[in-house]
Amino acid sequence: MLEKIKETASYLQNKMHTSPKTAIILGTGLGSLVNEITEKYEIPYEEIPNFPVSTVEGHSGKLIFGKLGQKDIMAMQGRFHYYEGYSMQEVTFPVRVMKELGIQTLFVSNASGGTNPGFEIGDLMIITDHINHFPEHPLRGKNLYGDRFPDMSEAYSKDLINKAMEIAAENGISVRQGVYIGTQGPTFETPAEYKMFRILGGDAVGMSTVPEVIVANHARIKVFGISVITDLGVEGKIVEVSHEEVQQAANIAQPKMTTIMRELINRS
Ligand code: HPA
């Protein structure tokens, strides 16, 4: 595995003209941040040795190198989800490659269902902590580097959370903070499951992010995460939910999320 990570990193290093310290996983709600990347250089996942192969026809995504403001960045357009059938090793492989490339800070976004009764559809939630509810742990197996038992006491950088709160206030954007529970999907939750996740301590539940954040922490990469609440798993407010509705709610929140991310990346 370490061989593969190094092979992929050296392939990318041969193509890169920059040495970014910042990476972004462009999850739901951040798609349009791509339009703000300048001096772009793109590599489709299909061309990258050892990158997971797409389970669906067509494009599985690409890596984008370029500048966001003054900052050199690398961005993943398209991530690998556990529910698609990838192993946890595959889901988190790009983060391991990031470490090898010298990335120090990772920014991630996602869509989630709100379980906090104070939340509304379209709210942004800065992730302060997470609960890993996936059935497989990304660090299970031989420890490749770093600690066998990694500390997770500040999985999401407090410094970046504080900066993001300042940026939101300056721009008149209201944001929530909360705990994200990552679970395997692909089903949305039953009312009883939403209730369980609330009791467990979650403010929102989604199907991504947690694996990548665990591996980033293991690699001592600082993390900032933000979630758009696209539906509500709150008793009395639960209605039928579809992928299309999730996308629609995320699109509405997109400009606010983009502003926070752009400014935060520039100041970090
Ligand atoms: N549950 C899980 N994942 C999600 C949800 C949800 O309600 N909304 C968007 N992603």
Image (spheres, helix red, strand yellow):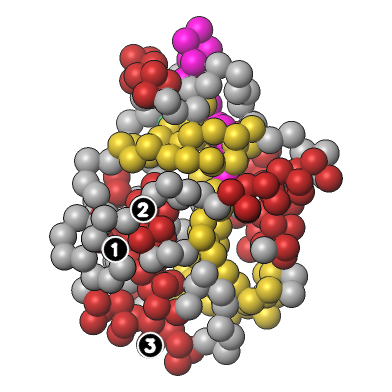
131 is higher (above) or lower (below) than 150: above
Stretch in magenta: 226-239
What residue is drawn where x is 36% and y is 61%? 218
The quarter of the rendered structure image containing the N terminus is bottom left
Considering every residue shown, the one lying at the far left of the view is: 141
Type of the residue with mark 2: Asp
Identify whether 223 is placed above or below 122. Answer: below
On screen, residue 100 versus residue 159, left or right, reads: left
| Residue 74 appears in the picture as rendered | no
Q: Is residue 229 found inside the magenta-colored segment of the image?
A: yes
Residues at marks 3 and 2, CA–CA distance in whole angstroms: 29 Å
Q: Secondary structure at mark 2?
A: loop
What residue does disc 2 label? 151
Q: Residues within 10 Å of mark 2 (few under 14, many from 20)?
A: few
Residue that badge 3 annotates: 10
Give the foreground label among 3 and 2.
2
